[in-house]
Amino acid sequence: MKKFLSLFCLTIGITIGLHAQKTIKGYVTDASNGEALIGATILIKETGKGTATDIDGAYTMEISDADQTMIVSYTGYQTQEQSINGASKLDFLLKSGELLEEVLVIGYGSIEKSDKTGAIESIKPKDKDVLQYSNFQDFLQGRATGVQVLSSGSELLSPSSIRIRGANSLRGDNEPLFVVDGIIVNSSTEDVRDPLQGGNSFLSAQNGLSGINPQDIESIEILKDASATAIYGSRGANGVILITTKKGLLGKPQFSYKATTRIGQATRLYDVLAGDQFVDYINEYRNIQGYTPTYYKYEDGSVANFNTSAEFMESRSDSIPRLTPINWCEDILQNSTSQNHRFTVAGGSESSRYYIGAGYNQASGIIPGTKMRAGDFLLKYDHELNSRLTLSPRISASYTVNNASKGSENLGSTNASLMRQIVEAVPFLGDLENNLGLDAADVLDGPRAWLSDYNDDGTEVRALGSLTANYKINDIFSYRVLAGVDYRNKERKLWYGTSLFRGRLANGEAGVGTLNRVRYNIDNTLNFKASFKKRHKINGTVGFIFDETNVQQQGATSSNFSNFELKYNGIAFGQTFSPMQLFNSQESILSFLGRVNYSYKNKYLVTLSFREDGSSKFTNENKWSFFPSAAFAWKIIEEPFMKNSNFWSDAKLRIGYGRTGSQAIQPYQTLTRYSPTDNLLSNGSGGGVTAVLPQNLGNSNLKWETTDQLNLGFDFGFLKDRFTGNIDVYEKTTSDLLQVLKIGPSAGFDEIITNAGSLRNRGFEIGLNTHVLDGKFQWDVYGTFSMNRNQIQNLGVPEAQFGNELRKAIVGDLVSGGTIFKVPANIFIEGQPSALFWGYQTNGIIDNTEELTGSPSVQGVASQLGDVMYVDQNGDGNISDLDLTIIGNPNPDYTVGLGSDFRYKGFNVNFFVNSIQGNDIANGNLGRQGLPTGLPNNIKTEVYEGAWREGKTDATYPRLGYSTKGDFTDRMIEDGSFVRLSFVSLGYTIPSNLIKGINGANLFVTGHNLLLITKYSGFDPEVNSFSFDPTRQGIDWNAFPNEKSISFGFNLNF
Amino acid sequence: MKKTAIYTIIFILLGLQACTDVLQEDPKSFYAEDAIYATEQGVETAINGIYYSMGAFQNYGSNFHNLMMPHSGLFYSSQQASVDLVGLNANSSNINISSVWEFMYKTINAANVAISNLEAKDESFSNKSTALGHAHFVRGKIYLDLVRMFGGVPLRTKPIDLETIHLARASRQEIIDQVIADLTIAKQLMPGPKDSPNGRPGKWAAHAYLAKLYMTLAVEDPAFWQKAQEELLPIIQSGDHKLMPTYAEIFREGNENLEESILELQYGFTGALRQSDMIRLYTPSNSVFAPASSPTFGRIRPNKEVFDAHFKQYPSDPRIETTFLYNTYPRSNGGTQNIYPKTKTGNNGYACIAKWFDSQYNGTTTERNYIMMRYADVLLMMAEVTNEISGPEEAYTYVNAVLKRARDTNGDGANDAEQPAAWSNMSKETFRDRIMAERRYELLTESEDWFDTRRRGYDYFKAHVIDPHNANPTFDKSRDFVYPDDTKNMLLPIPLTEISGNQKVSAGDQNPGY
């Protein structure tokens, strides 16, 4: 930095004679890398005249007076003022950020970037990158070290779960805390309550972090280690993501308009049997069983339902109707489209700055009828009332309308979900099996029924607002008060019509669920900053914070309709009602906090911080908890022996230790709650009377989950910062784990929320940035590498029989509510990584009688030729629960991200690749699609073709007619490693002098997800169907296919 | 600096002022326990909750049927989740076993909470003793079923708290003592049936179930026959309950809480949640007996030998038409479906139970109640008990009252059918055999089926359930299970969820044979 400063001084020092009039010209470039800044604004302060730089960053303008002052500004850079002093050539090197030094936003304050002591990663999204993402979570995948983004699916508004440095908690929330411009936003797992109950209803979650438009983001700071997050105390354990949105800049209004259009199609659909193959499959199966065939295939290849005999079929060939084969994927799936428009204006005067953004998005998904429309705006304003007091109001609001389809679903049957039925439905139109055994004329035919008879329509209003007052008491102290509000109102309306199994049972079922939530936080902070004798610099913050959340959820259901046209809107026309559900909850946190940063000679840095949190969720004995931290950094580069190095340009060692907490449980868990029963009790003559029952087992001993973390880091830069990067290693231990422990149901409840056990995460992260080429051709490459290993230290449960051994372990929740995969997939064993897969080991197919002799019976039933050979762990000749064993590990070995940005004149090409390696996926879909059971549902082609048959010795799949009781075996475990080309984009910047009134314009075309290298056989390896449920990890249960898409866009500045 | 100090003080004061009350939880949309028991109305809602819990889907509303009917050895079930039960090879992870267990204990816990709160109330609560009576009754009735199904089970008589989460199995005797204690209190505190509103049972229900317990014990210790009789006699003498004039009207749609009824689980169109699943479980699919828009499954079907035995014993018994649907039934689309005995293979190779049809069934809820105890059962118990104590002569009067009503098809008191003919001239042993069979003819699917097959010991079970099943001439080899000759079936396995969750119950505590 210093070098650039001197260069800058040199530049402005060159003054050439005094001329009364004429032209001034020069270049505006990025001070850090010399990149031309295209479209930078040049203003003459006195006259208000201005121009903008061209494609090479050059400008030329007429001036009337050589004593005038020039103001040069550019979005995201520090504005410079310079008097001309008669010069005819002036170059400007603009520095990013508002202040002299690059500033890093940290909790309740900011520091100069070079003064950071903790593991804090700062990302300043570039427009051209951020435009490729519809939400900021996905943008983070692979870009920040130690951050893993888990996708629940690829539907519109599908939520993404974020893990920072692995999962801390076995239960509850592993999501980081999000803070948007100082407003606490921790709604990632929040949604309306499922209004439909019974029958294992499952309403998949939608993105809870709505209303944050990635294009408005100025910077994202990711606080990873405890020395950075301890200031967030009880909510810092999972890391903190601070989002700072853009704000206004000095100068005339700068307008920009961006538009993107995207078109996509489902990708990686896999093969299931086509019509005539399906006929072969079912008939072959039925022949083996000695049943009459289901279908009859004529010589010309046409197919009909079999009746009576082959002779009969042939003799009446002319009159027997033929079945129409259908590929349901082709029939149902369509191309997706989306459009994105955004308009911003930013500007300001000496005393006030403003930034206004407004946008509109619309998208339709690959399922017909799925649609999302959203509009939003953001207004930021800062006003200096006087030299001491600055007021900064900020408000943003968004409105989203969404029509969803049935994606993730925790039931097992084919007809419980649209996506599953597209894959598994019988590939003939009008087949009884697809239509609940009814004539297709009465219903809507298989997967098609979902398009018209299922609705999940939502609307959401979200507003984030804050008012900040900054009062400068004197040169040392300033006081800041921030009142922030996050308001969210969401409604989801559901309808199951009678063509769907669930709707048929209930004769039409409608449900409406609403969420109404207000959260606010009031931050009072006193900041101080001082230096003594030039050697000692000290700054810091003390404060008290109050934070409250009020949630109201409502649910209403009715069923048994006599007409169906109004769908959910006709909920009042149902003939059977449940009492309306209304849930109110409130939680609050009161905190005191403090932090001191001290630096000596700008070489040795110390940060100390604490937070004392009191939570309403715990009883008085456990209400308060203290979260301290300490960090030390040594700027080796400032030492004499390094300072003059030609090689090193930055070197800093960091070490930090701290404690953070989590209280991610629902409120009122210390109390036993009494609520009315779902139905009323019948009073003996058909009427209803109120009945109440205890709902849970309150645990008054509940307390904080605490995480202690040690972090060691090294920041480095070589060759004048041509290479920069950082390395961090950490170890964190979470104790008093909040767990939902299964207890014997004789307690009247089958689980209790309690604190027990501890978990350790250790990891290693590298982030690198290089400017490979500078000059006319510019090439930047950046990359991340992260690995995390976790181990369960202690579970707080006694040893019990798990499989063939005594272990201290607990198993996760049942994956499905149906018959397939109705077992826990994950197990948590002391001394092992968390969430390992727990099932039966197998050893191929029993091909011959020799193998059969050695094969155990399965749950008491003798194996036969063509069965899957289970491994008998305990050698007792029978496969039972005692033979369950560890069959996989969903935790990745490492994750990698690699991005490249190549620029030549107006062109740029950039791409981003991300990869996760070494994790297993439990592909639950194989429980049905991977077994040739002979049941009338479709299966994968290779399952039929590779099935065992008499005399076959290399079968890869079991015999036709083979089925299990829904066992989870290692045949469902697949390697989930992948390398994905997230996007590749080609952009062109149109020179500003080409079109009058346009300061700059970019065009780009981007291909998304064009290349994916993986062995995974499902739709997409980036899948975690229950990403928010720590007890069901790494499972693909009826996930949605991903898309491959192309987008076009442009960006105009004027 | 002075100014700074002042600001700092103001700042701290502002902070402290906020911190007093804001961190207390103040529940809004639910009640805490003391609020429920603060009023008489609150107490009523809690007692309602206990009965609701008893009739819940996972309890007697559905899963009890899915568990106890197939495992009794008298029924076939086409439900995949019941395969192990149908083959009398119950698996401790069977979902029906674990949910019935869990919900029985949920009901017990609700009763425990009620009892402990009510005992602390003073007498100014006018419903204190009635409410206590109901809570004791339900707890006693459920422990009675638990001890008969599982033997000794964890004994919980206090509301659950953190210290008592893990609890070992009590002995069978301790549970029996608890049943006696609870039902004894219940019969003293519960009002008579005419004073019990909301379809709640009256005190005779407590007497009747106490008699059930004693009759179970009497097989080992004959002294209990006497005790059973002492419980049954007052029911008969009170005249509070009477046999309805005809058998058919007991199960006629719209009839509920009749004079004959002693314990009936109450259901109505009171919500959109599936609560009683009986209609779906017994009504055959695509039949005219339920609305076409509300599909039924007809999963639970009487075994071939069960149907055959009744038909063979009393070919013209009017109860057959009320109890069974057989040969054919009309399908909702106009066709006819053949069932047993017209067809003998596959799912339709079984007759159906016709007692629980509901033409108003809406696919979710039903207004049909589940009759678990009625006066005819009391009379049959009395006949059985009296035969054991003093031989058949004095016992005929009770059984013949039931048989006479069975013969009456129009309620005029005259004999309309020849069968079932009145009994006479039997030996004590014949009477014993016949009364056990008679209970099936009269009471099939009315909640005591499993218990009646087990309470007379394994030899009875083998001779009257296993052997007749395996030897029945219409046995379908491709589908019917061969019942194993295995004494483990005298009890059900303790569910796996209990063994893995309760630290004081280990795999070694499992019932023998499982």
Image (cartoon, coloured by chain):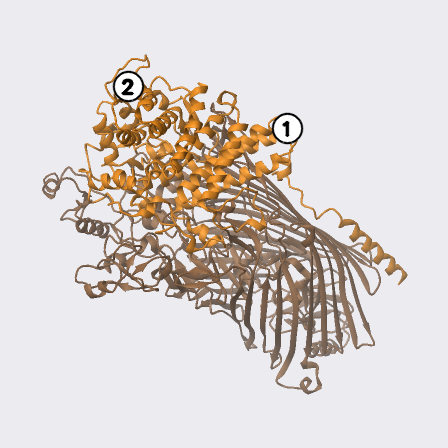
- Of residues B30 and B117, the one drawn nearer to the viewer in this rendering: B117
Residue designated by label 2 = B407
| A709 relative to B246 in the view: left or right | right
Residue at image location 24% in from the left, 52% down from the top: A961
Residue designated by label 1 = B125
Q: Earlier in the sequence, mark 1 or mark 2?
A: 1
Q: Quadrant of the C terminus of chain A?
A: bottom right
Q: Colour of chain A?
A: brown
Q: Colour of chain B?
A: orange
Q: Do we see residue A221 in this rendering?
A: no
The residue tagged with tag 2: helix, strand or loop?
Answer: helix
Q: Name the quadrant containing residue B374.
A: top left
Three-letter amino acid code at the position of disc 2? Arg
Three-letter amino acid code at the position of disc 1? Phe
- Of residues B302 and A243, the one drawn nearer to the viewer in this rendering: B302
Q: Position of residue A617 (x, y in %)?
A: 64, 50
| A78 relative to B152 in the view: left or right | right
Q: Chain of mark 1?
A: B
**Whether labels 1 and 2 share one chain:** yes
- Of residues A519 and A384, the one drawn nearer to the viewer in this rendering: A519
- Of residues A6 and A466, the one drawn nearer to the viewer in this rendering: A466
Q: Is residue A807 above or below residue A686?
A: below
Q: Position of residue A464 (x, y in %)?
A: 64, 49
The residue tagged with tag 1: helix, strand or loop?
Answer: loop
